[in-house]
Image: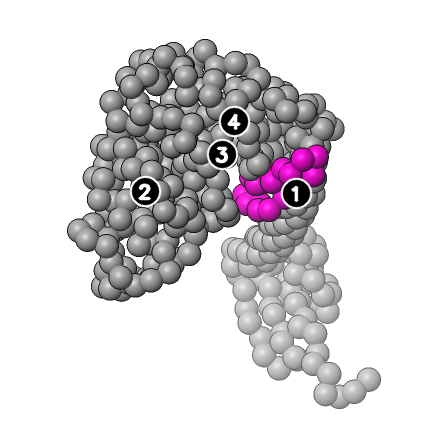
Amino acid sequence: MSSNRRAAPQITASSQACLPGVRGAWLIAVICGAAARLRLVINGNRTIQLSPGAAGQLLSNQRGAALLAALLAAALVTTLAAAMIFDQQIDIRRSGNILHGDQARLYALGVEEWSALLLGRAKEGEEHEYIGRDLPPIMVEGGTVGGRLDDLQGLFNINNLVLQEGEKLERVQDHFRRLLSNCGLSVELEQAVSDWLDSDQEPRFPGGAEDGEYLRRSPPYRTANRPVITPTGLGLVHGFAEPAFAECLLPLLSALPTATALNVSTAPAEVLLGLAEGLDPGRIEQLVAGRPRRGYQNLSEFIEHPALAGSGLTAETAAGLLDVQSRYFMVQSEAAIGQSRVVIHGVLERQGEAVRLIRRGR
C-alpha cells in the first residue's frame, strides 16, 4: 500500500484487561469497562488520554451527531419530495385550467354560431322570440353553456352623431341631448361627443373639445376623430367623468359601423322617452309593456300610439330615423367548464338569411 495513505486512528486501553490494538471506541469501551482509561493514537505518533467519563461523553457525542445528521438528511429528502409533489400538482392544475379554458371558449363560440343560425332562419318578427332574453343554459360535459341575444338597434347609435346628415343629424342631436338631460348630464356634452367623433380639429362652442383639451391632461391623449367601436370609450370625453354616464347613459348606447334607424319594437322606455319633448314617462312605460310580442308590423302603428299624442312625431320626421326591423345584434355567449368561465360578445349583422360576424370581444 502507498506510504502516503493516512493511517486510521487507533484507540487502545491502558488497562491490562483490555486488548491493545483493537479498533473502535465503542467496542473497547464495552470490553474494558468503566475502570479503563482510553488512549487515542492518531497516526501512530500522537496520544490523547481520555478518562472514562470523557470517553463516554465522546461516544455519546458521536452517536448524537450521527442521529442529527440522519434526521437532517430525512428532513431534506422529505422537503424536496413535498416540493416536487406540490410543483407537480400546480402543473396538473395549470394544465387542467388551460384545457378547460380552451374547451369553454369553443363551447362559447358554438353558442355564437347557434345564435347566428337562429337569426338567419327566423322569419320577419320571429327574432323577437329570442331578443332580450337569456337563452336557456344547456348542460354539457363538465359544465354548462348559455347566452343572450340583444338588438343593438334598439339602443341609441352614438355614431349617428357623425354618420347622419342634414335634418336627420339635427334630430339625432336633439335626441341625444334629451338622453343626457334625462340622465342628469349637461346637454353641452353632445358637442364634446360630436367633436370626439368628427374628423376635424375645430372645437364646437361652448361645450366642445378637441386635441388641445386632451393633450394638456396627464397622461395626454388625442380625440378618436372617427366613429367608435364601443361606447365605453366615451368615458374619455371631456365632461364624462360623472357616475351618471356609466350608470344611466352608457346602457342606452350602441356603436354601430353605419348610420342606423332606431328599432321602436325593441327600444327600452328610456330611449323612447328621448324621442320628443314633454313625453310622459308613465305612458311610455305602458307603451313598452303593451308592444306586440312580434313587434310592430309598420312604423305607423307605433307613431299613432296614444302615448305619443302631441309629440310631433310623424311618418315624415321619423323616416330614416325610426324603424321596426333591425340588422345588428349582440350575442353574449357564456360557457363554464370546471373552474374556467368564458364570456364572448359578438356583433352580428343580418342581411336577409345571411348573418355574419363583424366584431368579437371578451
Marks 2/1: CA–CA distance: 32 Å
Give coordinates of residue 1: x percent, y percent: 82, 84
Asked whether 124 or 190 is in front, the reply is 124
Marks 4/2: CA–CA distance: 21 Å
State the residue position of label 4. Answer: 324
Q: Is residue 133 visible?
A: no
Q: Residue at x 19, y 53 (%)?
A: 205
Give coordinates of residue 55: x percent, y percent: 56, 59
Q: Residues within 10 Å of mark 4 (few under 14, many from 20)?
A: many
Marks 1/3: CA–CA distance: 16 Å
State the residue position of label 3. Answer: 153
Instruction: Find numbered disc 1 in the image and state the secondary structure of the residue it sits on.
Output: strand
How many discs mark residues in the rendered view?
4
Camera-nearest label, 2 or 1 = 2
Evaluate if marks 3 and 2 touch, with contact meaning CB atoms under 8 Å apart.
no
Q: Residue at x 57, y 46 (%)?
A: 359
